[in-house]
Amino acid sequence: MATRHPGPLAGAIARTLLHRMGKQPAEALPRDWLDATILTVRDEIVERWVETTLATQRRALKQVNYLSLEFLVGRLLSDALRNLGRDGEVASALAELGVNLAEIEELEPDAALGNGGLGRLAACFMDSLASLGLPAFGYGIRYVNGMFRQRIDGSGQQVELPETWLAQGNPWEFERRDSVHRVGFGGAWHVVEDGRVRWSPAEYVEAIAVDMPVVGWRGRHVNTLRLWTARAIEPLRLDTFNQGDFAGALADQTRAETLVRVLYPNDSTPAGQELRLRQEYFFASASIQDIVQRHLRAHGTLATLPDKAAIQLNDTHPAIGVAELLRLLIDEHRLPYDEAWDITRRTFAYTNHTLLPEALESWPLPLLGRLLPRHLELIFRINADVLAEAQAGTGSDTAAVEAVSLIDERGERRVRMANLAFAGSHSVNGVAGLHTQLMQQTVFADLHRLYPDRINNKTNGITPRRWLLGSNPGLATLLSEAIGPAFVDDLAQVADIRPLAEDAAFRDRFAVVKQANKAALAAHVASLTGLNLDPAAMFDVQVKRIHEYKRQLLNILHTMVLYERMRAAPQLDWVPRVKLFAGKAASGYATAKQIVRLANDVARRVNADPLIAGRLQVAFLPDYNVSLAERIMPAADLSEQISTAGMEASGTGNMKLALNGALTIGTLDGANVEMREHIGADDMQIFGLTAPEVTRLRERGYDPRESLELLPELKAVLADLAAGRWSDGDQQVYASIIESLLTEDRYLLIADFATYDAAQAALDRRWSNRQEWTASAIRNVAAMGWCSSDRTIAQYAREIWRIAA
Ligand SMILES: *Cc1c(COP(=O)(O)O)cnc(C)c1O
């Protein structure tokens, strides 16, 4: 439809293509059009960004600084256009140029800045902060290769490939050569004049800020995502180079770049561990220096830091920042210890994301002392006060005193980052009600007794802009037609559709939207894997990182049992199911990788069996990321949230799926508990042991073999698996999985199998009454106003940061 006289916006995009990229429309590739579109839209965003920054300065507003090792932001163009309200205009302008907006949007790579729920939470929070007009900086690392891209090889195994999201440049970013900070490592500290301490690091790296704008809803407010990249102080040693030692000449630069190469380097080697700690300090130090510098420029004195800056630690990865701020205040700005500690504690707040002991971060004391000697000294100083308070409070209870210590003295001495974060913060929050309660009762029980006002709850949320308006335009349009558009500004209003669950005509329209989303996902899966999914079947999805506690294995074993049942009685009227799995297994996590392989082995066997054709299909979709999630959520009928009770901190996938009209099969874990309060018990399928029951069972002594005796079908499936019948005769591949199930079953799959099976059967019966199923799905959507991250962020603002939202 190219016209002779393009409109102003089309003209602007064509001029960007010519002037900034040096291309004529005739020679432009689709990716060039994408970049030209982003750069054109960016101009407007930058103007609003500057306005936001100036208004914040003029009004001397308190700012939020959200420190996170991950920001799983996904693609940015469609999000930015929607938030600016420009999607329609830009689509027409591009059409004038003969370009399809939806097609070029697909070419934008997902920003490879995160791994899973924690990183996605940070991204949803950034969206909500900007949408609520709260001035904020997100601080993180600009990973060149992210975590990894997941491929599934011919034998069904995960292969990790580098993510190359920056290969063609990143049109969203601005390198700030004036925001550069030196970060030191190693060396020693000594006392200089009047008792001051000076740390003389053995080496320095430079952190350079790379900023990306974060556009809020309706485009009124634009915040900053500031990511650090690293450069050697002396990137090239020319004398060494000229002597012919090229690698040596570039060694410092290589070391610097290693810091920002990948997220979560495998830390099973000492070198990997050291890299990880260096990375955390690099990021925390650069961010804290930056916050201090910006505050001083705006307000002149650090005494007001807690009034003008809140620092939120997203898990313990940036917790060394507590010691870094203290160090800067004392060593550089000459504040007395008590005043510095008071400022530090009033500025920091910490969000805990896990109770699993093996996931609580701690660093060997010698390693931390070698890399950060001055920080270790300050940690000892903080600890002395904490221990004194604990002794004063608990008297002779040495176990309680040991538990609050920042140093783990059992075995090799280690620094406990969670205890450092706890001690250095005025607020410590969990991410769902149950999780917060368990924090108080388990890992932080003694710290909680010592500082009883510190722990609070902020249940996670998701941004409805991406997870409803963006991912499910069909549903958004239907809602808007039915209840008006108010819900787009305030998701709580979505409650208005609840009565329409009783309206047959509305149910039909709702079902039509779901069906179209399923057809779209089926087409995508066909293009990815060659498998043609039956869009009439129940789409039963479990998509999330692969972890034993999330119990993908329970779902897979149940799928195997179901398959055997269908084979044994093919004449019966089975509810057709499509089982969808997606998720990455951490590269060093062998069991998780075997679970990926098993899902693929099961898929291969089931999908090839003509006897059950039309009844059961299984697919493992490779490389789960935000863009894939945006396709899956709107197409799901059933959401699997089946973690061992007490182990999932919150979950946000559960919320995305319910908001998109899936029913949940789940345990009373994480945010499922609160979802049930909002949705109502009748519209969720809850099963399994509760957290207190899990504790009691473990105390009583649990024998998985004994429980298995009552589950002959599961027993038979495990025997077949052991005999290699699901793995081309290979009896070794799954031997260790089976062994650990039979001897320990730490995640209680066997204990929960019967109730899970009963819950799945109940869902089959529900599915057979599709009107009622759809009504239930509608009530699920109606209840999800509460899950908006706008609600979560408003609570953080009021109760932790004390700023007006
Ligand atoms: C939402 C999301 C997650 C978190 O899923 P959970 O089910 O809460 O573990 C992980 N990865 C991606 C890409 C997501 O969008």
Image (spheres, grey):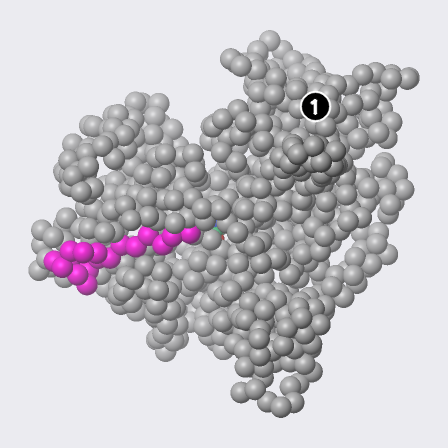
* Image position of 803 with respect to 311: above or below: below
Residue indicated by mark 1: 186
Could you say whether the residue bearing mark 1 is in a helix, strand or loop? Answer: loop
- Relative vertical location of residue 792 with respect to residue 467 in this rendering, above or below: above
Residue 400 falls in which quadrant of the image?
Answer: top right
Name which residue type carries label 1.
Answer: Gly
Q: Is residue 446 magenta?
A: no
Residue 606 in view = yes
Residue at horizontal 53%, vertical 58%?
109
**Is 798 or 266 nearer to us in this picture?**
266
Does label 1 point to a residue whose CB lies under 8 Å from ligand 1? no
Image point 45% across, 70% down: which residue?
475
The magenta segment is: 607-623
Question: Which of these two is toward me, 70 or 709?
Answer: 70
Pinpoint residue 325: horizontal percent, then vertical percent: 75, 32
> 88 or 791: which is nearer to us?
88
| Left or right for 329, reference 499 | right
Q: Count up the numbered dots.
A: 1
Check residue 612 for magenta coloring. Answer: yes
Q: Quadrant of residue 207?
A: top right
Side of 288 where 163 appears, left or right: left
